[in-house]
Image (cartoon, coloured by chain):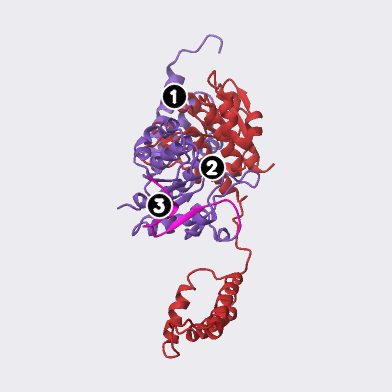
Chain colours: A purple, B red
C-alpha cells in the first residue's frame, strides 16, 4: 500500500462542519484519504462540511467516527500530535517538514495517525500521552493559532511533498542549442541594422546588451523560434514596407 | 523593512468573504500583512470574512481595494502568479518552495506581489501576462484545485519558513552527560537486582536491552533525574516495603 494511504488524519472533538469539510479537500489535494473523527461535537453542520469538501465528498462520507482517541490510534505504529503550545511532552516537537520522512517511512509498514485537537482546546494531555511524535507547525509569534483545516493542510502538504509523488511540470520544449541561439542573434543583428536601430559600428556593443537580456534564464527551442520569426519579419518590414510620407 | 512586510497578497476577483477572511488569518499566522483585493465580486459576505479572519481582523480592515490587477502590482518588482493549469506561460512554473528565496531576496528592495485568481476561474491570461514568475502548488492529480485561502496559506507558509523568522522550540533541559547516564544505569542495575528482575549473572545482558531502550533519542538532564528517582525508589521499596503474605 502506498504510504500516503496508510496515513490517517484524526480530528479530536471537532466543532465546525466547515473545518471538517475543508480538511477533506486539503487531504484529497495532497493524496491522503483516511479520516477519523473522535467524538465530534453534537450538532455539527454536515451541509457545510459537504460544501467545503467540494469534490472530496468521498473522504467525508467514508469517515470513521469513534468515541475515544485510543480507539482511533490503537493499530497505529506512530502517533503524531500537533500542538502549538509548549510544556512537558511538547518540547521535543519538530516541524512537519522535519517529521515527514520519518512518518512516511513508518507508513510503509504500519498505519500512522496524525492527531489534531478541537478548534477551542487543542489536544488534551490524555491525547498527547498517546503520541510518539510531536508536531509544531511554524507560525508567527504574533498569531500562532492556525485554523484546524489549515493545520491539516500544512501537515498533508509536507507529507505529499516528501512522498515525491508530485512531479513538477516542466517546459515541454527543450532548451535551445548554442548554434540555434547564435543563428537567432545573427538574424537580429541584420534586422536591427536594417531598421536603423544600430549601425555596423555600434552593432557589437548593442548586441551584447541584447544577449544579456535574452540570456537570463532558459531559452527553449520554442522561444528561439519565436525570436527568429520576429527578427525575420522585422528585416522583411525594413526592406519591403513603404515608408510613411513623414519619415 | 523586513521582507515579509513587502510581500503583498493580491486576490483577483474573489467571490467568498469566508475565503478572504481565512486568507487574512493564514497571512497573519505566517507573518504577512499586506492584502489587496482586485474588483471583489459584488455582495461579498463581509461578516463571514470577519468571522474567518478571527484575530486577523486588522489585515482585513486594512485591505486595499483596486479596480484592476495592473493597479495592484504597478509598483512591484516581482509579480508571481499562482496557477495549477499548464499551457503557455505556465510551463516555466516552479513550486512555492523553489521560488520563496528569490521572492524574499527581491522583497529586500521592492514590493513583491503574489497573485491568486478567483475561486471559479483562476487568473486570466491578462493577469498572467503581468507576472514575472509562475507558481505551481504541488497537488495530487486526483484533485488539483486547492481552496483559495489554502493556496494563500501554502505560499505564505513557504515564505515564512524561508524567511528564517521561526525558531523551533527546543527542550529547555540540556542533553545529559555520559557520566550522569552511567550513574543512572548503575542505580537501575542495583535496583533491578534487588527487586529480583535479574540476577548478577544475567545483569550485563539485561542492562544492554535497557540501555538500548533508553538510548534511542535524546536523554536530557531532566529525563535522567526522573529515571534516577525511579531507580532509587524501586531499590528502596525492594528493601523496605513489607512483603505481602502470599509472596
User: Is any atom of residue B10 visible in this view?
Assistant: yes
| Subunit under mark 1 | A
| Secondary structure at numbered mark 2 | loop
Task: State the residue at coordinates (60%, 24%).
Answer: B71
A101 over B1 or under it: above or below: below
Residue at the far left: name it.
A1
Task: State the residue at coordinates (60%, 44%).
Answer: B105
Q: Disc 1 versus disc 3: distance between alpha carbons?
A: 72 Å
Please identify, in this view, whether the residue under mark 1 or under mark 3 is nearer the observer: 3
Nearer-N-terminus badge (1/2):
2
Residue B74 spot, x, y in % from top left: 61, 27
Q: Which residue is mark 3?
A: A72
| Subunit under mark 3 | A
Q: Disc 1 versus disc 2: distance between alpha carbons?
A: 67 Å
Q: Disc 3 versus disc 2: distance between alpha carbons?
A: 19 Å
| Neighbour tally class for label 1: few under 14, some 14-19, many 20 plus, Cα within 10 Å | many
Q: Which residue is mark 2?
A: A119
Q: What span is colored magenta in the figure?
A: A65-87
Q: Which residue is mark 1?
A: A235
* Relative horizontal placement of residue B166, taking residue A100 as reference (left or right): right
Residue A22 spot, x, y in % from top left: 45, 37
Mark 1 and mark 3, same subunit?
A: yes
Nearer-N-terminus badge (3/2):
3
A60 over B230 or under it: above or below: above
Amino acid at each position: 500500500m502506498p504510504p500516503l494511504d496508510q496515513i490517517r488524519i484524526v480530528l479530536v472533538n471537532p466543532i465546525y462542519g466547515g473545518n471538517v469539510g475543508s480538511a477533506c479537500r486539503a487531504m484529497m489535494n495532497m493524496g491522503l484519504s483516511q479520516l477519523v473523527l473522535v467524538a465530534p461535537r453534537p450538532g455539527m453542520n454536515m451541509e457545510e462540511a459537504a460544501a467545503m469538501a467540494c469534490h472530496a465528498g468521498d473522504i467525508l462520507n467514508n469517515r470513521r467516527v469513534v468515541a475515544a482517541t485510543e480507539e482511533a490510534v490503537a493499530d497505529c505504529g506512530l502517533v503524531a500530535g500537533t500542538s502549538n503550545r509548549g510544556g512537558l511532552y511538547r518540547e521535543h516537537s519538530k516541524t512537519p517538514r522535519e517529521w515527514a520522512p520519518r512518518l512516511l517511512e513508518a507508513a510503509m509498514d504500519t498505519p500512522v495517525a496524525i492527531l489534531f485537537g478541537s478548534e477551542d482546546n487543542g489536544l488534551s494531555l490524555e491525547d498527547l500521552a498517546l503520541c510518539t511524535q510531536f508536531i509544531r507547525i511554524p507560525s508567527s509569534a504574533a498569531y500562532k493559532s492556525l485554523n484546524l483545516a489549515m493545520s491539516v493542510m500544512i501537515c498533508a502538504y509536507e507529507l505529499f511533498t516528501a512522498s515525491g509523488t508530485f512531479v513538477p511540470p516542466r517546459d515541454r520544449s527543450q532548451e535551445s542549442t548554442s548554434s540555434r541561439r547564435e543563428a537567432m542573434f545573427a538574424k537580429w543583428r541584420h534586422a536591427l541594422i536594417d531598421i536603423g536601430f544600430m549601425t555596423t559600428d555600434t552593432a557589437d556593443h548593442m548586441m551584447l546588451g541584447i544577449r544579456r537580456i535574452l540570456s537570463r534564464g532558459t531559452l527553449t527551442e520554442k522561444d528561439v523560434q519565436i525570436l527568429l520569426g520576429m527578427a525575420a519579419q522585422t528585416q522583411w518590414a525594413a526592406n519591403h514596407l513603404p515608408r510613411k510620407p513623414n519619415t
